Amino acid sequence: MPAGVQRWTAAGQRLQGETAAATATAVATKPKQTREAAAPWRIEDEKSGTKALAKFGRVVLWGVVALAAITGVRSWFWPDQPQAPTTVKVKEGPTYPVEEAQAVAGRFSRSYLTWDESDRDARAKALARDMPKGYDTTVGWNGKGTQNVVATLPGTVTEVGDKRARVHVDVLVSVPGAPATGKNKTAAPAEQKWMGLEVPVLYTSGRIVVTGQPGIVGVPTSGPSVTDQTTVESDVVLADQTKGTVETFFTEYAKGEADTVTAPGATVPPLPTGMNLGDIQSWTVDKGTGSDRTGTAVVVWDVSGAELTQTYRVELTRVASAAAERWQVAEVHGGAS
């Protein structure tokens, strides 16, 4: 080995030895650490609550995306205009005060068709109650004769516009008979007759008043034609079984003691006094089934020395007890439909 190289190597070895020695000395003199230095960072697991919150956020996000796909993003910023509510038309009842018009017209008719030449002012005062102030209350009568009204029956109210109407009233009047004369010392009895009166009325200031001249009209002499009623098939067997029950009922009915022979819980008001059972002309029961049946009884009553034939619809019910069962009257109604 050349001398120069040997010198360089020896110098390096000495330098290396000195460095090692210095390092050993520094380590020996360095104070001992109480704890190891902490690592600059480390990985920690997420808490369960944080994980749940993150999952919930993802669900909400995807829900918003789905909603946008369904409804369209445009509707979020330009929503559709709501449809106008549909107007429901409610049919209103009659606006004209029909009952009040009938009451006023009935009272006016009584005053209008009642007169007495011996007391002319009575009629005028009576008419003034139902006529506008300042109207002529002597209208329609010349101040002669005598007539009384027995009854008034207000009927149809026909509106004619502008709060005006026409009321039909049936009036039963009594006209005195011819007075006694020299040859006939007994006065003729009063005559009663029906007549119609049509009364013009006006609804003003919250009440009905009579504003025009009424007019006497005729009264129908018969009712309108109707179709023949359907004949109901009869249950002959049940009618025969319940005939005695019906006879007993009408006998006690005339006495005012019908409750003693009616079905439990049934109440039948008593008839007026003076009615006596004459005969049961017929008794039929409608064909049917069940424990409630209906029949028709034609009954003759003795009333004020006369015989009066009446028709009744009788409701029967079957009442059962431990010993037996029987039919009893539950209701009774006058007239046959």
Image (cartoon, grey):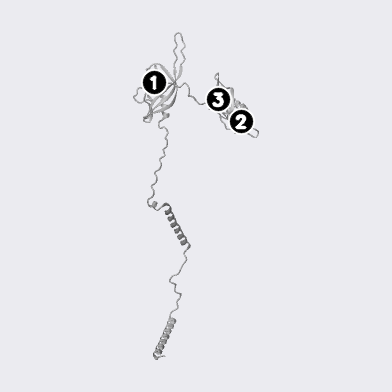
Q: Nearer the viewer, residue 264 or 99?
A: 99
Q: Is residue 124 above or below residue 18?
A: above
Q: Is residue 262 above or below residue 172?
A: below
Q: Nearer the viewer, residue 333 or 59?
A: 59
x and y percentages locating residue 213 in the rendered image? 37, 23
Q: Nearer the viewer, residue 225 or 270?
A: 225
Q: Mark 3: which amino acid?
A: Thr
- N-terminal of the pair, mark 2 or mark 3, is 3
> Of the residues tagged 1 and 3, which is closer to the observer?
3
Q: Residues within 10 Å of mark 2 (few under 14, many from 20)?
A: many
Q: Quadrant of residue 99?
A: top left
Q: Quadrant of residue 312?
A: top right
Q: CA distance from mark 1 to mark 3?
A: 44 Å
x and y percentages locating residue 169 in the rendered image? 43, 24
Q: Which residue is mark 3?
A: 311
Q: Mark 1: which amino acid?
A: Arg
Mark number, residue 327: 2
Q: Which residue is mark 1?
A: 123
Kindly check if marks 2 and 1 are in contact, taking CB atoms under 8 A apart as contact: no
- The residue sitting at 44% across, 81% down in the picture is 27
Quadrant in the picture for the N terminus:
bottom left
